[in-house]
Image (tube, helix red, strand yellow):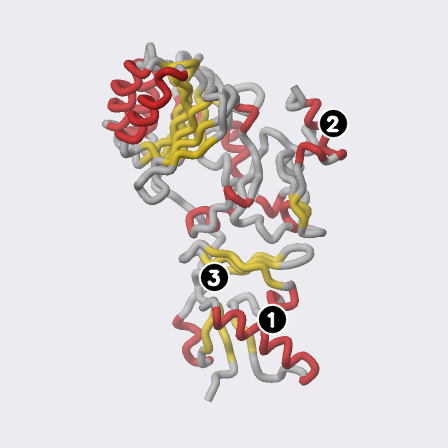
Amino acid sequence: MKQNRIKLFENCIIAKGASRSCIMDMQRQNYYMIPNSMAEMFDENHVFEVSGIEKEHQNTVDEYIKFLIDNELCFYCDEKLLDNFPTIDFNEWDYPAHITNALIELDFNHPDKGLEILKNLADNLLTRYFEVYAIGIVDVDVVDKVLSKIDDLDLYSYNLIIGFNLNDLEGGIRMINEHYKISRAIVHSTGRNDIILSDKGGWGNVFLIEDAYNHNQCGLVDQNYFANNIDHITESHQHNTCLNRKIAIDIDGNIKNCFGMCGNHGNTNKVNITDVIKSKDFQKLWHIKKDDITKCKDCEFRHICTDCRAFTDNPDDIYSAPLKCGYDPYTNKWEEWSTLSFKQKAIEFYGLNK
């Protein structure tokens, strides 16, 4: 005999949007689009009372339940067992690091100062994820020594953005593959766009891009960048998933929230990084979550999506939607963001039309 209640597995949560909803399976990192009427079946504990459905809606509800069961998103549950499955508390989020991810510009020909900053972040601020931007076109002969020093730091992984002379490109790619802590590499100024897949199950892929890289290229919102995992989703309920506990330090030592942001919060030659990250001014962007942002708060993808506060639809409104997002949660359509008429003024303001 079937139970009268179904319950979502605790690794599955629902985000209701303006026109439809999204069920996110954080364990398998899949997501499913569902109508809002299905999302509204469940209460705040993710339980749905099967009994008492009006006859005219029975066939539709049966289809909903079959979909959920077939995709292993829910299960039948006796009422007396419901307390055995407490829901995830999204009101609190923490992580064992003062800074979770850092962006660093590094001069590979004179790396000592940059490596010192990296070590400080790893040892004292417990940063484990880095993005390293090599300045200029780098000679392969010096790359191996610098990457080996980065590998020796107490960090989990880092992304590398670098440019080689075209004659050294193959050697540079081979060298990247030899450094196991590089989770992803972007090699710019190659004259072509291509992806070189590693044999490490997606770890260590090399992306070749045609032109030189600059920081104005960040901030793109795209389905390929969705992060459907418990760390990202729990953080998204209280914080900005791009800027929270993030730091960017350019080649001159200027400290920023992100390279795309205007201004800075001091210079490593004059101020202590630890003092900067503790300041309210530096942390103010950390707490702008998707539920606070115009348009994003109505989007079913808001808890798995990326965000950008450097480039927004309205440069005068910090709660404006990301400029480089072409998704409309009211029509459920994706469009090329750069061609949308209402974004042209902001595109010109940021100089992205150049």
Where residue 117 appears, as percent x and y from the top left, is: 34, 20
Q: Is residue 8 left or right of residue 290?
A: left
> Which is nearer the N-term, disc 1 or disc 3?
3
- Residue located farthest toward the top when viewing the structure as drawn: 110
Q: Indicate the amino acid at tag 1.
A: Met
Q: Element type at marker 1?
A: loop
Q: Observer-nearest residue: 312 or 224?
A: 224
Q: Observer-nearest residue: 51 or 69?
A: 69
CA distance for labels 1 and 2: 42 Å
Quadrant for the C terminus, please: top right
CA distance for labels 3 and 2: 40 Å
> Which is nearer the N-term, disc 1 or disc 2?
1
Q: Which residue is mark 1?
A: 41
Q: Indicate the amino acid at tag 2.
A: Lys
Q: Which residue is mark 2?
A: 345
Q: Is residue 46 left or right of residue 144?
A: right
Q: Quadrant of residue 252?
A: top left
In the depicted structure, whether residue 22 falls above or below residue 146? below
Q: Indicate the amino acid at tag 3.
A: Cys
- Residue located farthest toward the bottom when viewing the structure as drawn: 1
Where residue 253 appears, as percent x and y from the top left, is: 43, 15
What label sits on residue 12 in the rendered view?
3
Q: Is residue 111 left or right of residue 19?
A: left
